[in-house]
Image (cartoon, rainbow, N blue to C red):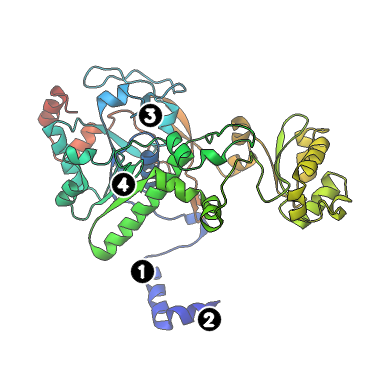
Amino acid sequence: MASLFLRRVGPTRLGGLLQRSRLLNVDHAPSQGIPPPLQGIKVLDLTRVLAGPTATMLLADLGADVVKVEEVSRALTDASHALRIMAPPCCSAVPLRTSGGRTSPPESAYFLAVNRNKRSITVNFKEPEGLAIVHKLVKQADVLVENYVSGKLAEMGLGWEDCRELNPRLIYASITGYGQTGPYRKAAGYDVIVEAEAGLMHITGEPDGPPCKVGVAATDIATGLYAHGAIMAGLLSREKTGHGVWIDCNLFESQLAGLANIASNYLIAGQEGSRHGTAHPSIVPYQVFPCKDGFIMIGAGNDKQFKLFSEKILDRPDLPENPKFCNNKARVANRQELVSLITDTLQKESRDHWIRKFTGLGVPFGPINNIHQTFSHPQVAERKMVTEVEHPRAGKVKLVSPAVTYNGKRMPIRRPPPYLSQHTIEVLTELGYNEKEIAALKDKKII
């Protein structure tokens, strides 16, 4: 392996890499983690709801300074634009009044889920003085992320061309329902609508039942992940070219890409997708089965696993020898008979009984856990997958930890999710506004 690496990079280049590593004092020991890679990167967050805030939260987790710009009127009244009021559930919170005299609602669980490590300011950028504030932020920003309907921000003086003129190095990421071009470019994007329109709902649900949506907003989350990756690519591109980039990311194309093998089956073979519940269309047994007191997912995906499953779980060593079940093709052809046989056996004992029998066997399985059982999972505690933070309004709040570790350590949650307008004065002061100017902006309800 070492000689292959030397052939690829050459001894001179290798020496340079090692020297650079020593100069940077790089330590790859697992206990060290890594420095926040986006420390010093400024992100202007003009997003609402889920896809955009997910992307900006991931950037914030990596050390970026994310300033979330909110509109007071919509943040307090319009649940379609603001997760803040999408409650219950929510945290009990000390009363908080905005500069306009309105009472800020309790912190919703939904908002808290996707806004850690950010700062919040409120600006009415429909007014010239408010727009001037956002323009100052644009000039300082490395990244701007927005999820307005295509063309809306351009009407307000904050489109790609407007912002590129102010800051040619800006990475400008637009997240929409259907993209910046095409007949649907002006259509608003909603996760559940795109799930329906882009095929996901058609393949989700029981074979004899209606189409179903996924239990969480999977299309929104996938789009946020795509946007996060695209923004990282934009930052790398800027290092090479010196120029910013306009990123066009949307729910529809993210979901289309997420159809994966189902899309490929159609494109290559003209095979239409269908609903299979928890079952797999081409592997048996590979689905959820009922036990006496719960459910268990079993994935005996090959002949070796099916043999183990038959001998050790079902106590039926004859099944792998039966021509109906001797290989996967036969098992698929005789799916209903085999599924009925397995179901009859598993329903005789409790879920925990079967978990004990499966453990260590080498056949993929997993209990169907509810959310309480999920967060009680020993892996959650061992991996510290929940972090408790101190919120200035709500007190102690538990959040799901960032999902990735680097050399064994997670990026820290440096800030709890912000309450509405928590950092307005702080950010305006950084922009050069003095106390008198800030007070005047408050009086005019610009902030």
Q: Amino acid at mark 3?
A: Leu
Element marked by disc 1: helix
Q: Are marks 4 and 2 in contact (CB under 8 Å)?
A: no
Q: Amino acid at mark 1?
A: Leu
Mark 1 Cα shell of 10 Å, populated few (<14), some (14-19), many (≥20): few
Q: List the residue tagged with mark 1.
A: 23
Quarter of the image where one finds residue 113: top left
Q: Earlier in the sequence, mark 3 or mark 4?
A: 3
Q: List the residue tagged with mark 4.
A: 182
Q: Which mark is residue 83?
A: 3
Q: Amino acid at mark 4?
A: Gly
Instruction: Give me the residue at 46% from left, 51% from top.
Output: 257
Element marked by disc 4: loop
Instruction: Give me the residue at 45% from left, 48% from top.
Output: 256
The image quadrant where one finds the N terminus is bottom right
Q: Nearer the viewer, residue 48 or 192?
A: 192
Q: Earlier in the sequence, mark 4 or mark 2?
A: 2
Q: Earlier in the sequence, mark 1 or mark 3?
A: 1
Mark 3 Cα shell of 10 Å, populated few (<14), some (14-19), many (≥20): many
Q: List the residue tagged with mark 2.
A: 3
Instruction: Give me the residue at 79% from left, 44% from top.
Output: 338
Does 394 sit left or right of 364 as displayed? left
* C-alpha gap between disc 2 and disc 3: 54 Å
Does 6 sit left or right of 96 as displayed? right
* C-alpha gap between disc 1 and disc 3: 46 Å
Can residue 139 be seen here? The reply is no
* C-alpha gap between disc 3 and disc 4: 29 Å
Task: Estimate the x, y position of residue 436 in percent, counting from the top left.
Answer: 10, 29
Mark 2 Cα shell of 10 Å, populated few (<14), some (14-19), many (≥20): few
Q: Earlier in the sequence, mark 1 or mark 2?
A: 2
Nearer the observer: mark 3 or 4; the answer is: 4
